[in-house]
Amino acid sequence: METDLLIRAYQLMLQAKHMALTYEANRPICKYVHSTSRGHEAIQLATAFNLQPQDFASPYYRDESMLLGMGFTPYELMLQLLAKGNDIFTGGREYYAHPNYRGTDKPTIIHQSSATGMQVIPTTGLAQGIQYAQQIQWQALQKGANGENPIVVCSLGDASVTEGEVSEALQFAVLKKLPIIYLVQDNNWGISVTAAEARTMNAYEYAAGFKGLQRVQVDGSDFEASYLCMQEVTKMVRHGGGPCLVHATVPLLGHHTSGVRKEFYRTEEDWDIHAAKDPVVLLRHQLWQQGIANEQDMQEWDKAAATVIQEAFDKAVAAPEPDITTVDTHVFAPVALTEEKGTRAPAGKEKIMMVDAALFAIREIMQAHPEALLYGQDVGRRLGGVFREAATLAEQFGEHRVFNTAIQEAYIIGSTVGMSALGLKPIVEVQFADYIYPGLNQLVTEISKSSYLTCGKFPVSMVLRVPTGAYGGGGPYHSGSIETTLLSIKGIKVVYPSNAADMKGLMKAAYYDPNPVVVLEHKGLYWSKVPGTEDARTAEPSADYILPIGKANIVTRAHEDKIDNGESCVVITYGMGVYWAKAAARQLNGAVEIVDLRSLYPLDETLVFERVQQHGKCLIVTEEQQNNSFAEALAGRISKACFTHLDAPVDVIGALNLPAVPMNMGLEKAMLPNADKVKERLERLLQF
C-alpha cells in the first residue's frame, strides 16, 4: 500500500481522536447531543478514500471520520456540532455528523435523519435512480473524469439491520441489481443492548438470505485490510456487479452519545477488549513496524493534529449563532406556478371520468418528461392499477418507467427521496389510503423534513397518489380517510380533487411542484358510479391545463337576496362532501353556497374567510370521523378569524367516531354523512 495513503489515514485518525478529546473536555460548550467515530476510524476512512465526486453517500451519525476522509474540515464539522448559523450542512438545524452536501468536488450526500436505519430506503432510491438514468442515457447523470459510473454507499450500524425497512431496501436492491454498497459497522452495541441480546446473527449472516446480495467481512479496525476490501468492492459495484453488503467489525471507543455515557452501562472488561483494537494504535504500530515513521514523526503529527483541532474548535465557538428570523425558511422550495393556465373546458370535448383524467395527465407528463416514472403495487403492465388508474401506461412507456413493486409501502414512498435528489420525478402510488401507515415513517422522517433540514438543498419533488374514501361496501380496510393524519405532517402538500378537471389540473401542478405532494383520489368519484356524483365527470382540459395548488373554488353560489337578507350559509368541503352538499343545496332554494377546497394544504384561507364573512353562517362537511379532525381544526380557525362576522357557531358534520368503516352497506350508510344529513344540519343552521 502507498506510504502517503497510510500517513494520510493516520493523520486524519489523530484529528478524529483529538476532536473526541476536545469535545469531552468542553462538555458545557458542546451541549448538543453528539457521537464520535472513535473506534470506527479505519473503515470509515477506507470507504471515503475509495469514493469519487460523482458518487453518493449516506453516512450515519457516527461517521465523522468518513466525512474527514471525504475532505470536510474539522471546522466545518464543528459548526454543526455547536449548531452555528454558518454550519454548511443545516445552518444549525441538525445534529452533529448529520450532513448533506451537493457539489462537484465530493460525493453527494442527501439529507441524513437520526432515525436508525431509516436512511437505507432513501439511499437505495439513489441507486434505483442511477440505474434508471443509465437506462434512458440521461445526460444529467454525472460520471467520473475517466467515465466511471457513480455508485452509492449507505452506512449504518449493525443494530439497525433488524429494522424492517432495511429488509425492504435490501429486497429491492437485489431484485433490481442496484449499484449500492451497504456498509455495516458492527461494534457489538446498540446503545446499551448487546448483539447477543438483540439478534441471532450478524449482518453478514443475515445478508445470506438475500439472493444476489454480495457480502464480505473485514476487520474494520485494520486500515489496510479495510482499504483493500473497499477498493475491491467499489470496483465490483462500479462495474455492474450488483449490490454488496460489507460487514466491518469495529470497537466502540467512546460513549454511545454525549448524553448516554459509557460508564452508565459498560464494564471495564468490555472496555479493555475494545481498546485492544484501537485503529489509531494499530496503524501507529504498522507505520513504526514498516519503518514509515519514527517516534519523533509520531509526536509531531500528534502535536500538529492537536493544534489544528484546537484552532478549529476556538474558531467554531466564536462563530455566530443562527439568525432566528430564518427559523421558518426552506420548509418548501419556491413554486413558480401561481396562476391557472391552459383551457379548463375546451369546446367540443367529451366528458371524462376522474380516473381517466388522472391517467391522461400522467400520460401527457410522461410523454414530455423522460425523468418521470410511475411505480407502486399493481400499477404495471398486467393490471394497470386495481382501479385501472394506470392502464396502458406500461405498454406505452415501457416497464423500466412504469412497474410493479412488492408490498412495500415504506420503500415505495421513501425511495422517492433518492430519486428526487438525482433530478428524477417519481410518481408513486399506495394502493389504498388504509395501507399508507407502513409508509408514514418515511413520509414523516425523511420526506417532510428534507428541504427544511438541508436549508433547501434537497427538497423532495415527488407525487404520492392515494385512493381514499368509502364507495359502498369496501369495508374496514378499503374505505378509510386519512387527511387529518397527513395534515399533521409539516413539509408536505395535500390536494383532494372532486372532479375530472380538477384532477387533471392538480395532478399536473403536483408534478411541476418541487415539493412532495399527496394527491388524495376518492374511489367513489373515480367513475361517478355513486348516485349524485355525475358532476365529477367534466370535459377534459387541454394538455397545458394546470391548476395551482392552494386555490379553492366556489362550485355553487347562493342567491344575492338570500345573502343580503342574512338567510344564507356557506358550506366548506372537499371530495365526496361536495356532492352531499350539492344535493342538499338543491333543496334549499338558493340559500347555500358551496366552496370546494380542492387543496387541503396549502389552504385557500383568503377565499374561505371571505365567504364565511359574507354569509355569517358556515358548515364544514367532511367524510372523516369528526372528533379531532382537520374539519374541526378548520372550524376553530374560521371562528377565530371571522368571529365578529358570525351569526351562528361554525358547525361541522363528519362521520361517526368509529375506528373503521363497517362492511355492511347499511352500517356504512349509518356511519357516514350523506345529503339528507347535510340538509338537516343546514336547515338548523339557517334558523339562526
Image: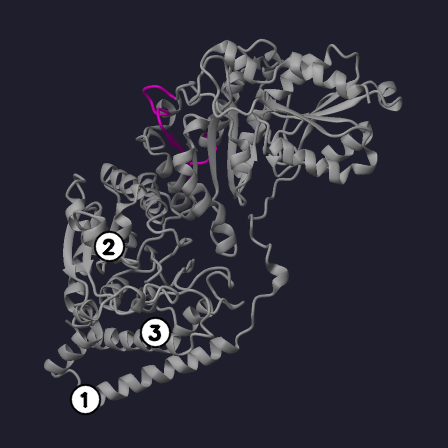
Query: Which residue corresponds to the image point at 78% horizontal and 37% vertical from the top-left?
Result: 642
Question: Which of pointers 3 and 2 lies earlier in the amino acid sequence?
Answer: 3
Q: Residue 552, percent across and down?
A: 67, 31
Q: Which quadrant of the figure has residue 310?
A: bottom left
- Please state which of the two labelled residues, at mark 3 or mark 2, is closer to the viewer: 3
Instruction: Look at the numbered discs 2 and 1 and tell me whether their residues touch, using CB distance below 8 Å.
Output: no
The prevailing secondary structure element of the residues shown in magenta is loop
Residue extent of the magenta highlight: 367-384
> Residue beneath label 1, please?
295
Please indicate whether residue 478 sits to the left or right of residue 631 in the image: left
Tag of residue 184: 2
Question: Which of pointers 2 and 1 lies earlier in the amino acid sequence?
Answer: 2
Its colouring scheme is one colour
Disc 3 residue type (three-letter): Ala
> Residue beneath label 3, please?
20
Question: Which of pointers 3 and 1 lies earlier in the amino acid sequence?
Answer: 3
Residue at the limit of the structure toward the left, as seen here: 289
Q: Nearer the viewer, residue 203 or 46?
A: 203
Look at the picture and state if 515 lies above or below 30. above
- Give the CA distance from mark 3 to mark 2: 22 Å
The tally of labels here is 3
- Give the CA distance from mark 3 to mark 1: 23 Å
